[in-house]
Image (cartoon, rainbow, N blue to C red):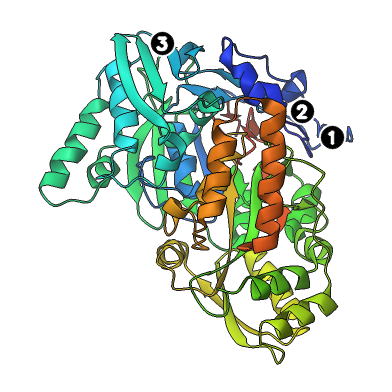
Amino acid sequence: MFKRKKSFKAGAFSLALALTVAGCASEPDEAADTGTDGDNGEDNGESVEGQEGGDLIIGVLSDINSMDPHTSNDVPSGQIQTNLYETLVKFDEDMELEPYLATDWEMVDDLVWEFNLQEGVTFHDGSDFNAEVVKANIDRINDEEIGSPRAILFEIIEEVNVVDDYTVEIVTEDPFAPLPAHFAHYASSMISKESIDGDYAAMEDGDQPGDYINQHPSGTGFFEFEDRDPGNEVTLTNFEGYWGDHAKVDSVTFKVVPEDLTRIGELESGAAHIIDPVTPSDLNRVENTDGTNSYMRDAASITYLGFNMEKEPFDDPLVRRALSIALDKESMLEATLEGTGEPANGPINDTQFGYSEEVPVQEQDLEEARELLAEAGYEDGFETTIWTNDSRERIDIAEVAQANFAEIGVDVEIEVVEWGAYLDSTGAGEHDMFILGLSLGTGDADYPMHMLFHSTNAGPSGNRSFMQDEEFDQMLHEARVESDEETRLAMYVEVVEYLNEQAPMAFLYHPSHIMGYSDSVDGFWADGSGLYQLQDVTISE
């Protein structure tokens, strides 16, 4: 199941209009059951069939922010949430949709979808999963009082109707073909109604949305919450009442290990079974050490350098464009990612409906960058800062950008900020420039475009560039509701071209997800967003 490199492309029909028929599962790729590295056929290390049981240890870079999937929007939290909660549908290893808590679904008419639900599913707190629960979850995500940063995914839903105990009807304001794919995003994870009711009751006593769920997380997943030591680790245990095939390990602990080389040392010593991430510069060490191996797949993800459009001089598109074309993406990939990943021509790649190769990757052009700065009144450059969190890869990116910007007279200081504070501060608009990424979790351009650029999402919800452009918002709306696939694809080409002209951010690259695992581990894989798939993992000591 481990692959040195996994390439995949998301078919347009599988992720858009073809979803309207029945939503049947497609079989996982047969290559997923091999112990080799996929494309080049070289063995990635011996695959060991482990026994069921044992305590799985995963060494991770950052701590989580929240156990509540509706009020958080960071990947470290998502890694825990996807193993506690479940969604109505999910993606398989090839980014094809398959049933999960919903057995099937169909578009009844242009504005109405119907989902049939699994029966006999129980939450960790003992309550039942049913249509009332689905309605409560969707209503909560769209509740303005909750202020969910994920509401952008589901705001097109006008109402949710309970047809019977295991059938739910979803009515949208406009036609929206990607809706089933949105229900594969972990932001739509189903929380028990008891936990939701408890959270609303706690809010009446002055708590913030999600505070109660943070203390009482209850999903339907194959793991349930055991313990959290903030800043250090989160432990989940096997849920004995799980409705499907049980997880094979007794527990999983997500252990925060911020230092890259310390994570590798823990993998080599056996203190961790899986580590994430492996920095590209450390890839050879992991691959050439006895007992350790790499797992790498192309990512449904974008890494970018964003500009705070509410601050001078970044309120000027000439300045933003100058900085964007001053960057040498190819050198950045070689220096930072050791040749892994691919340069970006916009915010999405070929894992997403809406991607087109028609849009060229912006090449470095220092002469034009200087001319644009001079036109904007900054012929002598200016001083500014780049913020990044404590990721070695992003710090390396900042250093390459710093050198590129110096060539056009822009003097940059790099500030490294702890992850939680980084999200809070960039969400509040305290930064000048910043480096961040987004997992493209729905297979459709609608989600990342809204998350990163729509006016209503400015701030901590995801639009940390604070782009507020009515013309662009209208472009997104028209593409969202267009039912003809070819027309919709052409619309997204125009959207990406508009973004490259306005330059709210420099689109750097689409990375590869690189992780390390020991010979004792079998059955692990990660999806296109880099989320760990742990249900079938076994370990042998």
- The answer to which of 236 and 414 lies nearer the viewer is 414
Along the horizontal axis of the image, is 369 left or right of 227?
right
Say which residue appears at 21% left-offset and 39% top-offset: 199
The answer to whether any part of residue 353 appears in the image is: no
The answer to whether any part of residue 276 appears in the image is: yes
Residue 521 drawn above or below residue 366: above
Q: CB of mark 1 within 8 Å of CB of mark 2? A: yes
Q: CB of mark 2 within 8 Å of CB of mark 3? A: no
- The answer to which of 532 and 422 lies nearer the viewer is 422
Along the horizontal axis of the image, is 143 left or right of 366?
left
Say which residue appears at 76% left-offset and 69% top-offset: 325
Residue at the spot of label 2: 35
Label 1: which secondary element:
loop
Callout 3 crowding tier (Cα within 10 Å): few <14, some 14–19, many ≥20: some
2 or 3: mark nearer the eye: 3
Residue 79 drawn above or below residue 325: above
Callout 1 crowding tier (Cα within 10 Å): few <14, some 14–19, many ≥20: some
Say which residue appears at 79% left-offset and 63% top-offset: 329
Q: Which mark is residue 403?
A: none
On the image, which quarter does residue 20 sit in?
Answer: top right
Residue at the spot of label 3: 118
Q: CA distance from mark 2 to mark 3?
A: 33 Å
Label 2: which secondary element:
loop
Q: Where is residue 129 drawn, in percent x and y?
A: 31, 17
The amino acid type found where label 1 is placed reads Asp
Q: Earlier in the sequence, mark 2 or mark 3?
A: 2
Q: Earlier in the sequence, mark 3 or mark 1?
A: 1
Residue at the spot of label 1: 43
Say which residue appears at 66% left-offset and 25% top-offset: 484
The amino acid type found where label 2 is placed reads Gly
